[in-house]
Image: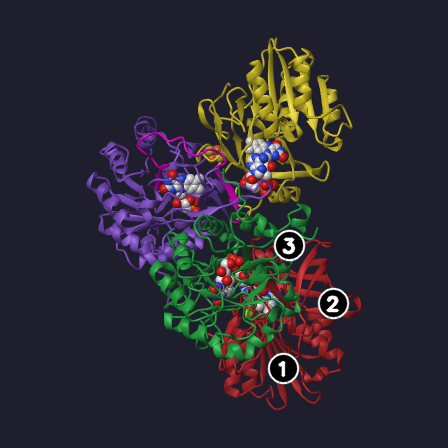
Chain colours: A yellow, B red, C green, D purple
Amino acid sequence: MRTKKIMIHKDEGLILSVESLNEKLFKLKIYSPVFSLMAMPGNFCHLKVNEESFPLLRRAFSFHRVEKDKGTFELLFKVVGLGTELLSRKNPGEKIDLLAPLGNFFSFPRKDEKIVLSAGGMGIAPLLFFLNYLLEKKFNPERITLFFGVKKEKELILLDELSAMRIKIHLATEDGTIGFKGRITELFYQELKERRVKLKNTMFYACGPTPMLKKISDISKKHNLYCQISLENHMPCGIGACFGCVVKTINGYKRVCKDGPVFDAREVILD
Amino acid sequence: MRTKKIMIHKDEGLILSVESLNEKLFKLKIYSPVFSLMAMPGNFCHLKVNEESFPLLRRAFSFHRVEKDKGTFELLFKVVGLGTELLSRKNPGEKIDLLAPLGNFFSFPRKDEKIVLSAGGMGIAPLLFFLNYLLEKKFNPERITLFFGVKKEKELILLDELSAMRIKIHLATEDGTIGFKGRITELFYQELKERRVKLKNTMFYACGPTPMLKKISDISKKHNLYCQISLENHMPCGIGACFGCVVKTINGYKRVCKDGPVFDAREVILD
Amino acid sequence: MIPDLSVGIGKIKFSNPVLVASGTFGYGEEYGSIIDLNKLGGIITKSITFNPREGHPPPRTCETPSGMLNAIGLTNVGVKRFIKEKLPFLRRLRTRIIVNVAGSTVEEYVEVVRKLEGKKGIDLLEINISCPNVKEGGIAFGSKPESAYKCIKAVKENTSFPVIAKLSPNVSDIAEIALVVEEAGADAVSLINTLVGMAIDFENKKPRLSNVTGGLSGPAVKPVALAMVWKTAQKVKIPIIGLGGIMNTQDALEFLLAGASMIQIGTGNFVDPECSVKIVEGLKKYCEEKRIKRIGNLVGKLKTK
Amino acid sequence: MIPDLSVGIGKIKFSNPVLVASGTFGYGEEYGSIIDLNKLGGIITKSITFNPREGHPPPRTCETPSGMLNAIGLTNVGVKRFIKEKLPFLRRLRTRIIVNVAGSTVEEYVEVVRKLEGKKGIDLLEINISCPNVKEGGIAFGSKPESAYKCIKAVKENTSFPVIAKLSPNVSDIAEIALVVEEAGADAVSLINTLVGMAIDFENKKPRLSNVTGGLSGPAVKPVALAMVWKTAQKVKIPIIGLGGIMNTQDALEFLLAGASMIQIGTGNFVDPECSVKIVEGLKKYCEEKRIKRIGNLVGKLKTK
Ligand SMILES: Cc1cc2nc3c(=O)[nH]c(=O)nc-3n(C[C@H](O)[C@H](O)[C@H](O)COP(=O)(O)OP(=O)(O)OC[C@H]3O[C@@H](n4cnc5c(N)ncnc54)[C@H](O)[C@@H]3O)c2cc1C
Ligand SMILES: Cc1cc2nc3c(=O)[nH]c(=O)nc-3n(C[C@H](O)[C@H](O)[C@H](O)COP(=O)(O)OP(=O)(O)OC[C@H]3O[C@@H](n4cnc5c(N)ncnc54)[C@H](O)[C@@H]3O)c2cc1C
Ligand SMILES: Cc1cc2nc3c(=O)[nH]c(=O)nc-3n(C[C@H](O)[C@H](O)[C@H](O)COP(=O)(O)O)c2cc1C
Ligand SMILES: Cc1cc2nc3c(=O)[nH]c(=O)nc-3n(C[C@H](O)[C@H](O)[C@H](O)COP(=O)(O)O)c2cc1C
Ligand code: FES
Ligand code: FES
């Protein structure tokens, strides 16, 4: 994984909009020129959802979309608990306390490589940023394949935008309403086994819930794929100081917030 | 003090409006037919400002205005901390968890008595309810004198409504912008000493910050006034179960929430 | 399937495992107009001492992050007036009545217990050897194994009611204290009482409580209470009654998983007076949904490996 | 008037009373890009043991009402790598460096302390006799007066650095422990370390932490910490360093009033990385506004009668 010395900053962002995509999914647009400039695909920000001591700790969210010229960025998030609930109730004009850019970021493929991305549910959040970033850097969309899986059809968001990219897209829904019926990892593995996904000269990327990443990690180990996965964990500090967010790897425990969140799938030991 | 056996209820009120009178003062209008019927002047309600564990405990507010026919009541409150801050940010349509009617209430004067009310700051909240109640019961407004004192002019609220009542009003502001310059207790005591306030056949009532009530209590003891004062205290349970809200009286500790909040000023020992 | 929520301490059966905690429910009357008291597993009274106690001067309580402090100082009417004025109301209820007993000396505990002996309407005693808010007695008994043993032993010898020992969390090893009171004959232990805490009125450079320190309760202490229940459950055989920050059904279930066979609601009553009966309902619904025949089947079922 | 914020422990002067707490600030580097480390009174390192420690398996932390639990398990690089890899960065700072030392046996404490002896860049040692998250050692030393005495005594005999004893709140009487470590030669005490706590993942009927129990910190424990600082201040003569839930200037001032002459920020660093330097600024502003010449004049000024 390539890394660079990142300078972490604190900034007070200005909330521009809170858009609800469905009852659980929200898009938060924040004005913060410094972070819109600094954020790389895979980086995340750590933010305080309110000023009180409950919830106490910051919450981590991947950069989802960045508009440097406008000085803004977007987060895409799902309401799963009190913190995200409070975040979804923010109003335009409110300030928000941000710590960013945190963590490492996805390695970029060479121009002559192919890439395969797998997104499970909210895993699409950082991968969309990555896709947009690559296309902006003139990476050939024909070399890109995206596997995108969700539970129910209504969680299939961003489809228009993804289609317009002219990349290859495989969809999976667990209830089978659209695309493959089942989990994204099953579809991915099927395509892999039937050689419709080529291993040579291909870089893999995955982001999604831990059980999905565990499967991806197993597949990567078995087939020796070079696959980067983005992990999540409870993160008290977010900057590598507390050793609270570690993941087991073949090289001992590593901090997801600082040594990751992007790891080589063959390195981590998930369970 | 006359009391009756009150049945305490829990009800979910519907917030109809939150009106800001100045940057710190708010009026909250709640739809709750049961409490609009049951509330008596001096009673209070105990409400939960949010659903989280911080702030944890309920907050107490006097009934300020009641419209039985519409099934609504109003609270008048000042933002002094997190609880009242959160309350001031409520939106119409939200539900609010209410416990009421709590405590005893002001005794009513006989038709042939005169009454003198002293309100310091937010102390006007329950006294306005009391005034409206008396006028509705055809108590002669000419027999009513109100002393109303605040720190700064802009805290002098409800003046139009009070003026329209055709009662006698004495105003005091600490900065002297309007009315008497100084504290309401000074004005009250001056009027008392100069016999412009008659003691015979008069009932006194007071509500306001504790230092003011202490003065009123001292005056009442000295001149043997029959004065009812409404006290405040931290109230964990609000219904008499925890003995957390006691005030010292000549008859031992008494619970402000259940034995009060209205007490005979000669009984309590404030400091 | 109607799940069986009943539980027992010694020979005493409770219709369900939900009790209301001492000092947070007065003598039962106050909450009677808001909830149906008969739905509770039992009611624990405010601590009763031999003589009436006025308690500490105000201020007696204050709020802290996700918790509250209290230093009531064992305000109570004394055992004689309790029997005369408060017990008749409690006796009429169809729920278990547990009288909480406090004292400054072992002799005082014994005297109170003797006065209560045989009184109709009482089902059990809870012995408060853990009150952090009185100088003499209280917590002193609960923080040393020897005195805890002596106190519970003396009480047991002077009562025919089953005895619950209420333990203090302000100790190095609560399970050790639980073991000795079990040996002394306690029929159950309840934990935790409040943690010693303090808050400062910064404006006036004064403590917020007249008593300077007080007892911390509420959600803030739940992690501490859970750990203590779990540790004690590894050691003692008598039933454990868990409390500390329980506000809803899930909290209650967590204490059961950690090893408590019953639970108490304290501060939760203030936040929502209906909290206790909602939890009774909630436990029932949970057992129905998960097809759990007896609530007892959940006790201690935390998977720690 | 420029108020004097400086304070001292033994012969060591600190520019101000604000330290960052062990385990919450890594080895200082991580926060270096966010705040100016030289503004701090001092930095306390993550606990250092003799050998490197991997620590506990994840999950290691979880959030609780107004607090958090951690069971990191003393993850650290070991004393040799600490000296080689971490100390050079710390040495370059113009702030006091306090190395926090932990061990499983008195011998291990002594061995670590000997390795650190005379190393440039170190100003003081903080001896962690209170870590709730390791089986052997740690808290065991801090919860019994005898072992606390033995450990601090042995450390003192093997170091020329001033020694701070970090005490556990999981005891019946923290002031008693403070007294014995004072007797053993400690130059200061810091309190509190975390309270033992536990949280349950109800869905999966599992503890939220792999280690089952962990240490509770944050605003939830502030009342407990304040009470312990206050009680200890009535007993010992050596300086007290107060911590537990300090999030802002007012919290810090409350600890000073209760009797702490310095304070530490732990969990507060996570909530707001700038919290510690904001408190330094805040203390200065407060002293200016109130015309307090020396911050020390506030220490112990709580009016309790
Ligand atoms: C690097 C990183 C990037 C992330 N990016 C996104 C994103 O783009 N969109 C999105 O919807 N979510 C994202 N998450 C997950 C998001 O942080 C959690 O959903 C959120 O913290 C839950 O907070 P809550 O208060 O609503 O939930 P609660 O469950 O109430 O939170 C309780 C505690 O658990 C922690 N927690 C709960 N779930 C997670 C989780 N999956 N990961 C880390 N901590 C968790 C919280 O921080 C908190 O301490 C990301 C997490 C990480 C670590
Ligand atoms: C019977 C009664 C009637 C009241 N009526 C009104 C009213 O009509 N309008 C109004 O503006 N205020 C009224 N108050 C005061 C109001 O309850 C407090 O202002 C409010 O609780 C402050 O909450 P907070 O979270 O904003 O403040 P914080 O100071 O953050 O509260 C911290 C704690 O202190 C308690 N507290 C703080 N101030 C008071 C106080 N004066 N009385 C009781 N508890 C307090 C809170 O309940 C809480 O536990 C009344 C109080 C009582 C007891
Ligand atoms: C206001 C108040 C008064 C209390 N009084 C007593 C008491 O008299 N006797 C007793 O054994 N415990 C008393 N307690 C402790 C509670 O019974 C309980 O042990 C503690 O509050 C923890 O539970 P909780 O977090 O559910 O409140 C009191 C608690 C509060 C909050
Ligand atoms: C994640 C984490 C790790 C900690 N690690 C250590 C440690 O290694 N050594 C130590 O003495 N204390 C450790 N502590 C305890 C803190 O130094 C401090 O005593 C405690 O958190 C209370 O302060 P706070 O409420 O300000 O966090 C740790 C605390 C946290 C939250
Ligand atoms: S969150 Fe603290 S090290 Fe990763
Ligand atoms: S608030 Fe509980 S008795 Fe008054």
- In the picture shown, does residue B246 fall above or below C303? below
Which residue occupies the foreground of this view, A8 or C90? C90
Queried whether the magenta region covers residue C246, the answer comes back as: no
Residue labelled with disc 2: B34
Q: Amino acid at mark 3?
A: Asp
In the rendered image, residues at marks 1 and 2 fall on the same chain: yes
Based on the picture, tell me whether residue D65 belongs to the magenta stretch: yes
Q: Position of residue B185 (x, y in %)?
A: 54, 77
Label 1 packing within 10 angstroms: few (<14), some (14-19), many (20+): many
Of the residues under marks 1 and 2, which one precedes in the sequence?
2
Provide the residue designation for mark 3: C4
Question: Which residue is the site of mark 1?
Answer: B116
Pointer 2 indicates a residue of which chain? Answer: B
Q: Quadrant of the C terminus of chain D?
A: bottom left
Mark 2, residues whose alpha carbon is within 10 Å: few (<14), some, or many (≥20)?
A: some
Say what amino acid the circle numbered 2 marks: Val
